[in-house]
Image: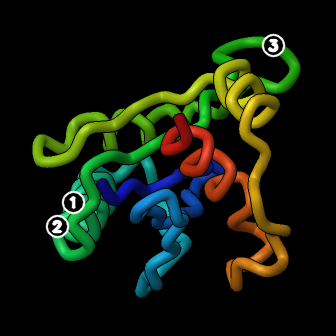
Amino acid sequence: MRVCGVEIKGSEIILCLMEMDNGLMVLPDCRQVRFPLLNDQDTEQMRKFQFSMAKLAEDYKISKFLVRERPQKGKFSGSAVGFKIEAALQLIPTVDTVICTNAAIKDKLARHPVPVDFRDTGLKAFQESAFITAYAYLIY
């Protein structure tokens, strides 16, 4: 099963593709790891963003988008644009979207730490949170 870890930062998403093959972590290359939402007030831009994500899921045979949960209120709450991005992903009919709670991610990482140093993965530093989200979902 190929999944896509997603971190929403402001008005863009950061992605990390991952799958497990016989217990080994595989990190397929992706043509684009950042997708900005240029204008969330424009319906056409929202549709274009959602189409781009649906096309990415189709092209890379992604079965799930794994979005790291963000608080809805409080000091560290997510932005309105971020929640619109989250909704756009959830409404893609061909792929499931799972909201991964920070508590569940922490719990899984405590029981099954990441077996490699992140710097050795070949991913960009800004992809680390998306990588951790995908890894925590895929481990048992």
Q: Amino acid at mark 3?
A: Gly
Residue 20 placement, left or right of 78: left
Q: Dot 3, how many residues are within 10 Å of its Cα: few (below 14), some (14-19), or many (20+)?
A: few
Q: Which residue is mark 2?
A: 58
| Residue at the image position 54 percent from the left and 65 percent from the top | 25
| Residue at the image position 53 percent from the left and 51 percent from the top | 6
Q: Which residue is mark 1?
A: 54
- For the N terminus, give its image quadrant: bottom left
| Residue at the image position 57 percent from the left and 31 percent from the top | 80
Q: Secondary structure at mark 2?
A: helix
Give whichever of discs 1 and 3 has the lower sequence position: 1
For the residues labelled 1 and 3, the Cα–Cα distance comes to 31 Å
Q: Nearer the viewer, residue 121 or 111?
A: 111
Callout 1–callout 2 Cβ contact below 8 Å: yes
Do we see residue 45 in this rendering?
no
Q: Which residue is mark 3?
A: 74
- What colour scheme was applied to this rendering of the protein? rainbow
Give whichever of discs 2 and 3 has the lower sequence position: 2
> In this rendering, is residue 105 above or below 34?
above
Callout 2–callout 3 Cβ contact below 8 Å: no
Among all residues in the image, which is located at the extreme top? 73
Q: Position of residue 9 (x, y in %)?
A: 67, 51
For the residues labelled 2 and 3, the Cα–Cα distance comes to 36 Å
Q: Position of residue 113 (x, y in %)?
A: 79, 45
Q: Amino acid at mark 2?
A: Glu
Residue 19 placement, left or right of 27: left
Q: Position of residue 107 (x, y in %)?
A: 74, 23
